[in-house]
């Protein structure tokens, strides 16, 4: 049987085998080409240099490190010239107004959160009979002045009486002197010659001397009495003047009571925290309102280790949290002698129990310099507001 005479199914099998062989021969070159391409790519990657071996990388790295070192050094040199803290706030002596007398308010100025000058009338309390007390004190003072005038007139009269008594005493004194001299002559003659003087004359001279001496003594007593009356009159003048001083003090006290009814601003500043209105009853010590004075400063609580180079007068940059873009100027005014904890209500007792060292805070007072920077009075800055001061210590 020849090939032409083969069955049909065998012919089909031979055809399929021929097609498979042809397909395999076509796929084999493609696989070989893929293997070659993979080998070539591996070779290229193996020949590519590392990044760490490139000079540009090291140049960039050195520049970055040098810039960081130089920048850090410059920052340290700049930062070491300053000391700063965020434990700081605006401070001032707040003036709290309170009445000295009790009463009802009949007038209260409508000046909440407004600036007032010193002496501005803020409130008035109802008088309640204070005017009558002033009038009574003034009347008593006038009465005491009249008593003083009367006492002074009595001094004048006493002086006149003393002068009159002295003038009247001259005659008895002169008579007593003459009688004493006559008696002395008679007694001298009697010692020289007993017959030169009669006994009756001697007795008469002695009697006259005794009488005139008694009259002279009475005259002296009258003069002394007149002098004593002058002293009494002068003491009455002193007493009258003391009474006048007392009456004057009563008038002043009454006037003070009247002035206490009118409450004025003791300092210039902004009125805050008003707590009363017209018709409110107030008593001594009741807080009516408060005034924040124009003069303010910064109390900065620096660590004690920050005070080594800090001195009075050093310039300060002040940043208020409410106005971060405004740079206020100031200077160190004073440093408190002692840490803040030493003045606490219950100061620590480090001698008892375990001790742990803690860096303490010391209050430093910083004053605003409106001439060298923004004026803080133009901004609504008040006590308690947080600030960050920076002191230039080098």
Image (cartoon, grey):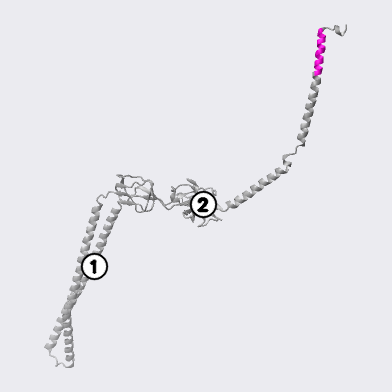
- In which quarter of the view is residue 27 placed? top right
Disc sitting over residue 235 in the figure: 1
Q: Relative to residue 316, is residue 295 drawn left or right?
A: left
Q: Relative to residue 102, is residue 186 drawn left or right?
A: left
- In which quarter of the view is residue 49 placed? top right
Tell me if residue 300 comes above or below residue 146 in the rendering: above
Say which of 302 and 316 sits in front: 316
Q: Is residue 136 magenta?
A: no
Q: Secondary structure at mark 1?
A: helix
Q: Residue 228: give x, y in percent of width and height.
A: 21, 71
Residue most toward the right?
1
Q: Residue 131: give x, y in percent of width and height.
A: 24, 53
- In which quarter of the view is residue 180 placed? bottom left
Which of the image's four quarters has the C terminus? bottom right
Provide the residue span drawn in magenta: 8-22
Secondary structure mostly seen in the magenta stretch: helix
Residue found 18% across the figure and 73% down from its top: 160
Q: Residue 372: give x, y in percent of width and height.
A: 49, 55
Say which of 385 and 199 sits in front: 385
Residue most toward the front?
4
- Tell me whether the residue at label 1 lies in contact with that at label 2, contact meaning CB atoms closer than 8 angstroms: no
Query: In the rendered image, which residue does mark 2 sit on?
Result: 317
* Labels 1 and 2: the sequence-earlier one: 1
Residue 142, visible in the rendered structure: yes
Q: Residue 301: give x, y in percent of width and height.
A: 50, 50
């Amino acid at each position: 049987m020849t090939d032409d005479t083969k069955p049909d199914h065998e012919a089909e099998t031979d055809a399929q085998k021929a097609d498979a062989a042809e397909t395999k021969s076509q796929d084999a070159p493609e696989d070989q080409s893929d293997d070659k391409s993979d080998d070539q790519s591996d070779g290229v990657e193996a020949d590519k240099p590392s990044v760490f071996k490139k000079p540009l990388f090291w140049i960039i790295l050195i520049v970055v490190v040098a810039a960081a070192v130089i920048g850090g050094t410059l920052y340290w040199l700049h930062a070491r010239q300053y000391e700063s803290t965020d434990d700081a706030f605006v401070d001032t002596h707040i003036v709290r107004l309170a009445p000295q007398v009790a009463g009802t308010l009949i007038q209260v100025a409508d000046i909440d959160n407004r600036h007032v000058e010193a002496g501005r009338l803020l409130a008035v309390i109802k008088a309640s009979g204070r005017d009558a007390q002033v009038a009574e004190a003034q009347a008593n003072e006038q009465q005491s002045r009249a008593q003083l005038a009367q006492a002074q007139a009595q001094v004048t009269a006493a002086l006149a009486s003393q002068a009159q008594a002295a003038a009247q005493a001259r005659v008895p004194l002169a008579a007593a002197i003459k009688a004493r001299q006559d008696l002395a002559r008679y007694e001298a003659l009697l010692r020289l010659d007993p017959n030169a003087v009669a006994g009756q004359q001697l007795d008469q001279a002695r009697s006259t001397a005794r009488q005139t001496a008694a009259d002279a003594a009475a005259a002296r007593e009258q003069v002394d009495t007149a002098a004593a009356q002058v002293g009494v009159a002068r003491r009455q003048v002193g007493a009258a003047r003391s009474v006048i001083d007392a009456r004057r003090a009563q008038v002043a006290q009454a006037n003070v009571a009247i002035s206490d009814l009118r409450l004025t601003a003791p300092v210039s500043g902004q009125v805050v925290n008003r707590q009363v209105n017209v018709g409110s009853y107030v008593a001594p010590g009741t807080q009516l309102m408060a005034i924040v004075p124009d003069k303010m400063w910064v109390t900065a609580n620096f660590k004690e280790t920050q005070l080594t180079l800090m001195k009075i007068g050093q310039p300060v940059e002040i940043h208020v949290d409410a106005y971060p873009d405004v740079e206020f100027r100031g200077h160190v005014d004073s440093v408190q002698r002692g840490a803040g904890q030493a003045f606490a209500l219950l100061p620590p007792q480090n001698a008892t129990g375990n001790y742990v060292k803690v860096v303490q805070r010391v209050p430093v007072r910083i004053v605003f310099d409106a001439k060298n920077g923004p004026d803080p009075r133009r901004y609504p800055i008040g006590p308690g507001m947080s600030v960050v001061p920076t002191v230039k210590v080098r």
